[in-house]
Amino acid sequence: MTRWAMVADLRRCVGCQTCTAACKHANGTPPGVQWRRVLDMETGHYPDVRRAFVPVGCMHCDAPPCRDVCPSTATRKRADGIVTIDYDLCIGCSYCAVACPYQARHKTDRASFAYGGGPSPAEAARFDEGRLAVATKCTFCVDRIDAGLEKGLTPGIDPEATPACVTSCIAGALHFGDVEDPASNVSRLLAENRHFRMHEELGTGPGFYYLWD
Amino acid sequence: MTGAAATAKQVATYCYQCVAGPDLLTVRVEDGVALAVEPNFCAAAVHPGAGRVCVKAYGLVQKTYNPHRVLSPMKRTNAKKGRDEEPGFVPISWDEAFDLIAEKLNGIRASGLLDASGYPKVAASFGGGGTPQSYMGTFPAYLAAWGPVDMGFGSGQGVKCYHSEHLYGELWHRAFTVSPDTPSCRYIISLGSNTEASGGVVGVKRHADARIRGLKRVQVEPHLSVTGACSAEWVPIRPKTDAAFLYAVIHVLLHETPRASLDLAFLKGRTASPYLVGAHGYYLRDPASAKPLVWDRVLDRPVPYDTAGAEPALEGSFTAPAIERGADGERLGDGALAGTTAFSRLVAHMSSYTPEWAAEICDVPAATMRRVANEFIAQACVGQTVEIDGMVLPFRPVAITLGKTVNNGWGGYECCWARTVAVSLVGALEVPGGTLGTTVRLNRPMSDRIGSVTPGVDGFMAYPFNPTDREHWSPRPNIRNAYRTLVPLAANGPWSQALGPTHLAWMFLDGTPEGLPAVTFPEIWFVYRTNPAISFWDTAALAEKMSRFPFIVAFAYTRDETNHMADILLPECTDLEGLQLIRIGGTKYVEQFWDEEGFALRQPVVAARGETRDFTDIATELAQRTGLLESYNSAINRGAAGLPLKTERYDFSIDVAKPHSRDEIWDAACRAASAEVTDGAASDGLDWYRTHGFRTRPFTRTDWYLYPALARQGLRFELPYQERLYRVGQELGRRLHERGMTWWDSQLSEYQALPAWKDFPGLWEKAVVAMGARAQDFPFWLVTARSMQYAWGANVGIELIHEVAANVAGHGGVVINGDTAAGLGIAEGDLVEIRTPRRATRGRAVLRQGIRPDTLLMVGQFDHWATPYARDFDVPSMNALVPLSLELTDATGSGADLVRVGLARVGARR
Amino acid sequence: MDRIAPWLQTNWDHRAAGNFIGGGTGSGLAIFAAASELAGGNPPRAAYVLAALFIVAGLSLVWLEIGRPWRFLHVFFNPQTSWMTREALIAPPLLIALAAAAWHGGAALAAVAALLALAFVYCQARMLRGSMGIPAWREPLIVPLALATGLAEGAGVLLALAIVAGAAPSRFVLILALLSLVARWIAWAAYCRHLARRGAPTATRQALQAIDLQVLVLGTIAPIALIAAALGFADYAGPIALAAGVLGLAAGWLIKDTILTRAAFNQGFAVPHLARLGAVGSDSSTRPGWS
Ligand SMILES: Nc1nc2c(c(=O)[nH]1)N[C@H]1C(S)=C(S)[C@@H](COP(=O)(O)OP(=O)(O)OC[C@H]3O[C@@H](n4cnc5c(=O)[nH]c(N)nc54)[C@H](O)[C@@H]3O)O[C@H]1N2
Ligand SMILES: Nc1nc2c(c(=O)[nH]1)N[C@H]1C(S)=C(S)[C@@H](COP(=O)(O)OP(=O)(O)OC[C@H]3O[C@@H](n4cnc5c(=O)[nH]c(N)nc54)[C@H](O)[C@@H]3O)O[C@H]1N2
Ligand code: SF4
Ligand code: SF4
Ligand code: SF4
Ligand code: SF4
Ligand code: SF4
Ligand SMILES: [Mo]
């Protein structure tokens, strides 16, 4: 069995937002919609202060509350762990958005472009009416993965078959791979480092791990 | 997602939007439209950043299609200039634009290139630390063909930049920029070097790898920057007191740790530590050879420093038959003279600079400084070696880095000196793991740092000081900022003009001080990729001065605050539209030192938008219309396009008699590049680079380090004692005073052989008083910091950048310590006013705990009022507040990006 | 705003709140009307019509909120796990039953309508509980609270209706209403206590705190006192009951509107271990907006 997962190394991340921008390029998301986002968190009191950068987005949960609540079955979970949205089934009720404890879901009702007014040639080429008024979120770049697998490539290793945010990360903080395969890059990282998953207590079983030591 | 497009391709190019580049990328193009930026995976093996580009590069698609672009040449119709004057730009044809410019230029050629004051009538300013050169095609060839051009009207780069490091760094270790040997370093003391925001792709990648490897970085700076966040420790130091911190570290090294823990062999053999210093502060010299003397322990007598087999004494005082020579060759002593080793002088000099002393000044516990100093020695691995490419070298994995504001303005010299001395005490200078210089700009050849190491006086590397002797020093500057007259260290190469005291050119326009020819307005000013009206100091005053320039030609991507004053706007092909070949790899800016070197092509990813023209074609056209075609072409042949087209190994030179198209010129450059990279084996031209993007050959790591080159030539680092600088300062003072020029006297005080701590922060408080106000009314330090998402103000007009930058704290306004704010009744988002006695600005309060209570931070450089999109941000900039000031100008001619301010709440959150 | 500490969810606005208000009140009303009918009383037929109107109003508000209203039929695709589908499936038979009960009358039809109505509020309650992203909603005790307040609201409307219909409410109805108010207070108090114990965003707890007193005094004690009075002074029962009903109803709507909007802060983000980076000293964590 295969279980695709993301691993973010908090020791490496510098909050540069390159992954955020790379995702927007790869997936043509409209202004303000960030499927990948990196938080700038501060804790403590001067002078004992810590600041940390934390990549977030859809965690592709094992037990995704977004799927369970979805009345239209637009949200589904694949055997390989990727949680998908069928834009043609989605009724845009946003129930999934309130069910997601990771604030990973977005809905844009009207077409919007970077500089107001009309689309730039690039925006016009990327525009997809089908993504309006429906739920959207990080897809784990499922198209890249499937196309890559067809070509016999290994997601997480071959750039072409790997999520855009991962291949763009200038600090090498983001990793992607199959956690069911003990020999995979991500399995090794998880075996060699201390890690956690966000909001573990909610039992969603995120497919997104954070390395911290 | 986009469906299958008729034509889809991945085009390779480079990004050099900030000085931390260049880096390599590809752009996905479908049906002629640029859709997405992606890394250049083919470059992963050669590029230290794994072929990836940073967030700024992802702004290039929007940059290309930015609806606010200037897409045709424009002519100003409103003769009146000023911030409040609408320029009334109207579109004109390229032909008309060239006519207007050529008319002026030809007029100047007819009437003489210099004006009555002897200054060039043509001036040109380019910004961002030299990055525009990677976008201006063959324009440098045109300037070379033209003759004298004043490139000394500053735009922040230089005097606001790494200025002291640029100048002193090149003197001491060919270090225009300094970097840790990050790939093998283990311990870094970073005084405000904001690497994780400013170090680019390569810096970020290498430091991330190093952290995993266990590198410990101590980030010393007033606010908890992005870099502090990624460091083992944050030490919140009081601004402008870094020299005291470093002095305390040196004190611990010299007075609290056994000598044996220092690298004595390095000090004796590779520095001037053993040189004997006489009573007047100059080296004792061998009467016969005039070479500096050392005390030989073997023969127990003085010998010239370069005597074979000598065992120089590192410490002690000795009497020796010698001469002591001062400024202008003055004989200060002759006969049996008492001398003390430079090292002993240093030890004595640092004795009072204890951590306890520094604690008061820096507001950092003495224990912290002591611990950091001891960790530094412990990690230095004194005595260990490592073999690299068959060469055994010292291994000293410790480094000290200095950020902007630490290494410019008053205190910059002391910080650079202390940093370089501190690392040399453990032998961690220019060796594996240690503190390295990575590029040269004042020494030559610029493309070969190691090759720039040549023997000079007294066993040190040669350095092209501007002359200060009676015969050669000139009171008649070649350009308006008078770098040759005032700043011997600035040298006199192609970069020297921009590295002079570039704000003086602006200041002197309204009053030239005693002894200099009256500073005049240039008859034509070319501006490209720089926005002094936003990026420099006292921006309101600067904009006003610009408005009085008679004729400004601005290469314009969008309207901005500087080209608001322009007479002609010329839209050039920008990043994804133009074509140019540049050098990559080897050792370049800051962290950019590679295991490969070669060339990369920037090529049209999409068709040029509107009427925009490639910079090379613009330059060629100008050359033709001003009768300079032949010298322009020869300049290209000589190497103005990045490399010579003709050497003894190859000849791809172009026919100088006729004009050449962009592609002809760059095809020749590409062939030359292929030949250089393959030692003449290949001669592939433009088409090859269009498909492959870049071409490199291996670059040996041993060339990352200067140490081998010095050892080969038996040279020493000119440390710790600065006899030469002291002499130069003395001579400069005499020259100036001989002309009755006393207004540079405070700057002269910087020329000390062993710099003493001076009350640097106090200078900024004095400046407040000098403006006729009370220091206590301006109790805060206002500082600035880089943003990884922004390249200065160059990409402020790009929505994507603005959107993602909002995820990082501080971009929305002025960062204030939460408790300080509470004390002043300021809540998150409140409108606050930040004042100096002269100017005021307003912004939104951003409350954080990660900043000193006495410090305010304004990230980046915003406050735009003309640049479309950015003018709606209403985010303040320190540049509105920092004065243009001679008092705050140091001896190298730089100032610093900080200022004393008052703070008050003026309104509620939006 | 930095959007790291929990922020108010904006996916569902007052329109969604309206559905829970309409659905709850309507169902409660239907149940009470049926109950009194079964107990031999004869509640105004208008009660069933009104109940249906409340429910329809609520549903059409949701319909207005969804992004692709013309795909509303897809709402029926996931009865396996989605309480929204289940709510939607029950709505049509419920409305038919209510219509029939109103038209035809009779205990049997009323009983059917009441059972469907009960199922309907239950679905709504489970919908909230299923919203794992909103701590104030996912709290299990929201289910009894939603049911209890639905009943209390229905009771309120019925008391009010009685006087419209010119008849004073029967003792039976009065007593049921009183019990529903008590039940709601217990459910509300338990909900708040349990939520606080299990942990919730600070802002959520503040928003609930802010209405606690009103719910107790105006929404519970006052109507109970009035009902007691109504039981005592039969002659004035009508107007007194009306006042009690309005208070009970208003309190219910206040509770729902608060939970669905002002207290609906999302989970936010948390980091149980910050990166070490070679720092000496203890392991630190952060969870902004929770205390
Ligand atoms: N507050 C503050 N001020 C600072 C600094 C700071 O840290 N804080 N840093 C200082 C330092 S170190 C430096 S080096 C300087 C740099 O300052 P500058 O060298 O002046 O650089 P920018 O301000 O980025 O100006 C770049 C200009 O080029 C324009 N531009 C961008 N792309 C193109 C293009 O493709 N074609 C054309 N024709 N124009 C283009 C932009 O619109 C912008 O107006 O700033 C200094 N100023
Ligand atoms: N992303 C990006 N990268 C860049 C650039 C860019 O515009 N964008 N510009 C390039 C250029 S031209 C330059 S010059 C470099 C600048 O590179 P850096 O010097 O690393 O950049 P800054 O962040 O401007 O300044 C560094 C830090 O100095 C601290 N500081 C201010 N005053 C003091 C002080 O008195 N003492 C101490 N210890 N710290 C102080 C501030 O807190 C700030 O965090 O960046 C280069 N790289
Ligand atoms: S690109 Fe990598 S380093 Fe930058 S913010 Fe994203 S994860 Fe962090
Ligand atoms: S993170 Fe949210 S959207 Fe993604 S699978 Fe989990 S619950 Fe669903
Ligand atoms: S918005 Fe779409 S995906 Fe989300 S729950 Fe409703 S139908 Fe399902
Ligand atoms: S995996 Fe793909 S879709 Fe998800 S954040 Fe990364 S780039 Fe975006
Ligand atoms: S660091 Fe970023 S902006 Fe600077 S040159 Fe590299 S890719 Fe371009
Ligand atoms: Mo700079």
Image (cartoon, rainbow, N blue to C red):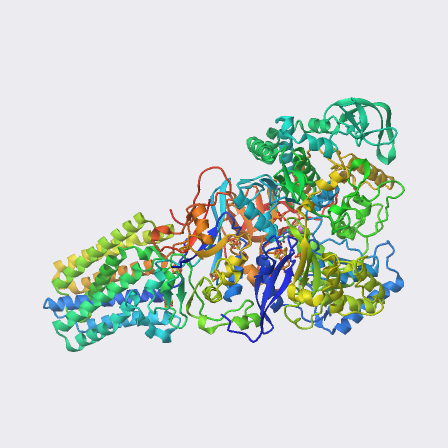
The residue nearer to you, when weighing B460 against C70, is: B460
Percent coordinates x, y for residue B361 in the rendering: 61, 34
Image quarter for residue B74?
A: bottom right
Judge from the rendering whether residue B493 lies leftward or rightward of residue B880; answer left or right.
right
Judge from the rendering whether residue C109 lies leftward or rightward of residue A42; answer left or right.
left
Q: On the rendered image, what quadrant is the N terminus of chain A found in?
A: bottom left
Q: Is residue B451 visible?
A: yes
Q: Residue at x 15, y 71 (%)?
A: C110
Q: Is residue B584 visible?
A: no
Percent coordinates x, y for residue B560 in the rendering: 66, 62
Image quarter for residue B308?
A: top right
In this rendering, the answer to whether B889 lies above or below C13 is above
The residue nearer to you, when weighing C212 against B738, is: B738
Percent coordinates x, y for residue B403 in the rendering: 63, 45
Judge from the rendering whether residue B121 lies leftward or rightward of residue A157; answer left or right.
right
The residue nearer to you, when weighing B742 against A56, is: A56
Furthest residue toward bottom: C103
| Image label count | 0
Percent coordinates x, y for residue B301 in the rendering: 80, 23
Q: Residue at x 15, y 57 (%)?
A: C228
In this rendering, the answer to whether B587 lies above or below C176 is above
